[in-house]
Image: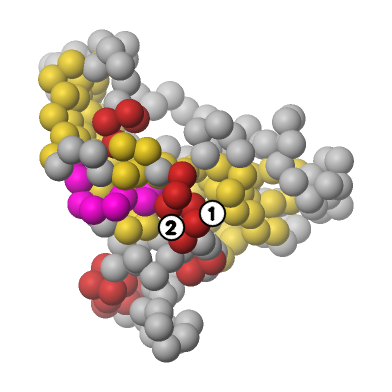
Amino acid sequence: MKTATKLSPLWPALLLGSVLTACGASSAPIDSTRPTLPTGAEVRHPAAAVGVATYLSLANDAGASVYQIPVTPDSTVTEIDPALLSNKQTGNTVAIETLIPPTASGVTVSPAGVPVLRLHWVMWQDKNSDGQLSEGEALPLLTHDEVVYAGQAVSVSFQTIDPKMAQTWQFSQGWNRAEHYVYLPKGGDTFQRSLTTNALQRYELHQPTPITSM
């Protein structure tokens, strides 16, 4: 199954070029110091409610919003500008080894110590009208894809028992979408799961599904 943080000038120019070629679209420069942006950067989601302010936020593992954008009522697609994610978010990175489950076995990391930040999209309704994501405002939607920053290209592999799963992470340098993919080999009992950076900045929020769903 394929499911399913202001971006900095670290966004790789080569990566952007591949997106533009694949989509066959043109783009306009942000300014003289930044590379051109890919088109089609967006979050797809169920229709936003009418009559209540709805937002999309990028949240960290603690659930705190680090970036948000309003959602047009009744819309099902919200365009995002990757250039709006700030460099200051890179100060919240941690060594990638700390993100691996402590009970994992067969851990390999190359290279070691790479600073990483993983964020996820949240769609929420501003019920108390304070303009901030508060407890109980998040809608029951998710995407297994993530927004990831890595200080340099890094590869990780490990295995977990619950769920019984072999996992690999392949992150390119800079800000990227980490695409989630999981499957159970025919006749096997160990799920294979990967998070691999992908040039196409399209995310889809959907009803919750198990991380091992097909």
Residue 198 in view here: no
Q: Do the residues under discs 1 and 2 have CB atoms within 8 angstroms?
A: yes
Magenta-highlighted residues: 146-155
Sort mark 2 into few (<14), some (14-19) or many (20+) by Cα contacts within 10 Å.
Answer: some
Give the dominant element type of the magenta stretch: helix, strand or loop.
strand
In percent of the image, x 32 and y 58: which residue is there? Answer: 174
1 over 17 or under it: above or below: above
Disc 1 on helix, strand or loop? strand
Mark 1 / mark 2, whichever is N-terminal: 1
Residue under label 2: 202
Say which quarter of the image contains residue 140. top right
Give the number of marks: 2
* Residue type, mark 2 in image: Arg
- Residue located at (43% from left, 52% from top): 90
Tell me the residue that label 1 is attached to: 44
Residue lying at 31% horizontally and 50% vertically, measured from the top left: 150
